[in-house]
Structures are given as C-alpha cells and as structure tokens.
Image (cartoon, helix red, strand yellow):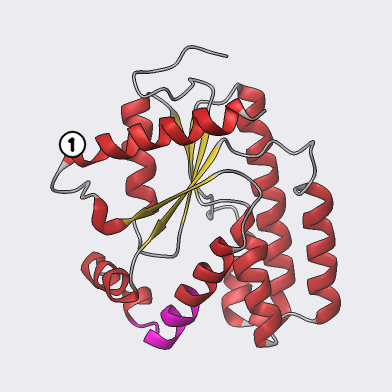
Amino acid sequence: MKHKNPYGIPKDAVITIAGMVGIGKSTMTRTLAERLNFRTSFEKVDNNPYLDQFYRDFKRWSFHLQIFFLAERFKEQKRIFEYGGGFVQDRSIYEDTGIFARMHYERGTMSKTDYETYNNLFEAMVMTPYFPHPDLLIYLEGSLEDILERINRRGRPMEQETPVEYWKEMHDRYTKWINEFHACPVMRLNIRDYDLVNDKSSIEPVLEKMGFYIQKARSKL
C-alpha cells in the first residue's frame, strides 16, 4: 500500500463526490484535493456536441447525451487509475444511470428500447470486477430547504428559474438512489456538519472519517 497522510488516506486513493445540484460538490472536491495534495477531476461540458440540441429537444437527444456522458466518464475513470490514483472526482459515473437516464425514461423523454440499451451498455462497461471503482464515494446530503437556499445564494439564473417541483423530484431521486447504491463504499455527509466557506477547519473531521472508511474497506479486500 502506498504511503498514507496523517488521516490514514492512501496516496493512491480515488475519492468521488456525489450529490444533487447546488449541494457543494465542487467546493468539497477542491478542498479535499488541496488538503490531501490530490488532483481534481471535474465534469467536462465544453466539448459536448449534444448539449445544445438536448436542451432544445429532450426526447430526440437524451439517449445521445447519456451515451456521450457514459463514454467520457468511463475514459476519465480509466485515466485516473492508469495515472495511479490520488484524485478527487466531482460527480460519479453511477449518477448518470441511477438518476438521469432513469428520469428521462420515466418522464417519457427516452424510449424503453433506448433506456434498456443504455443500461445494458452501462452494466457491461461499469458494473464488472474489471472496472476500477472509487475507494470511497462521499455522498453530500441535506434537506431540500437547505439545498434550495444554496442554489439561491449562488445566483445562477438557469437554476433559479427552475421550478421547485423539479428540485423536489431530484432530491427524492437522489435519496432513493443512494439508499440502493452498493458499487463502492459510501460515506454520507450532511451539509450542516461542516462549513468550508466560513470555517476551513471543519474539513478536519471529514478527513478523519474518510480515513476510517477507506481503511475499513481496504481491510476487507
């Protein structure tokens, strides 16, 4: 096992941050990477050839968009492990199928055939012993009220114009998803338990908890 830091987190660990929009994944990703001297991996949207078409016609482009995300996240996951680990990821590959593809299917903006094809491809690519799963998935959770307050505070027009009913649906979907998730070890973290903006030291208990979870998981291998 490679050298560990004072928190017992191996230098080759791969940490993934998950949670719904506005909950603070990017801030947590940057803070952990800085404290652990890890690299970061953020979602790339600039090179997405389907994004504009998708927002104009969900039903026509949802399958194409999800396939593109799946391919890009799969390549990024391989790159991280080929590099030797030491990364914090903003968003996981698992949310695409568990949250977004399922939502499109259930809302009728993805056909049953496309949804089944996407899921079969996801299972073949990701849910196998050969796919390099993260050492730990940190799931950021909080009440819908707390998350809406954060969304309003950061002031992105597109998010603020989104109906509250949509955020409630996403909150419910994320809760259901994480309760059924078993692809890798999970550490749940309530956003009220830390404040990375006003109290930098609040990351310390998080790091200690991470070390415990990772060591516990690796001892079972």
In the image, residue 158 sits, relative to residue 14, either above or below, namely: below
Q: Give the range drawn in magenta.
A: 161-170
Residue picked out by circle 1? 201
* Quarter of the rendering containing residue 21: bottom left
Which residue is at the far left?
A: 198
Predominant SS of the magenta segment: helix
Are there few (<14), some (14-19), or many (20+) residues within 10 Å of tag 1? few
Identified at 79% across, 38% down, the residue is: 129
- The residue sitting at 66% across, 49% down in the picture is 183
Q: Is residue 167 magenta?
A: yes
What secondary structure is found at the residue carrying circle 1?
A: helix
User: Where residue 219 sits in the image (x, y, percent)?
Assistant: 59, 26
Q: How many marks?
A: 1
Q: In this view, does 100 lie above or below 139?
A: below
Residue 50 visible in the snapshot: no
At horizontal 64% and vertical 39% (from top left) the residue drawn is 77
Q: Which amino acid does label 1 sit on?
A: Ser
Image coordinates of residue 14 in percent, x first then y, are 54, 33
Whether residue 137 appears in magenta in the rendering, the answer is no
Q: In which quarter of the image is residue 130?
A: top right
Where is residue 100 shown, x and y percent of the image? 61, 69
Q: Where is residue 8 in the image (x, y as percent from the top left)?
A: 41, 22
Would residue 205 appear left or right of 8 to someone viewing this image?
left
Q: Nearer the viewer, residue 207 or 72?
A: 207
Residue at 76% x, 49% y is 127
Task: Please state, as top left, top right, bottom left or bottom right, where the C terminus lies in the image.
Answer: top right
Q: In this view, does 98 lie to the left or right of 170?
A: right
Q: Is residue 19 above or below residue 152?
A: above
Q: Please identify the quadrant where the N terminus is shown.
A: top right
Q: Can residue 75 be seen in this view?
A: yes
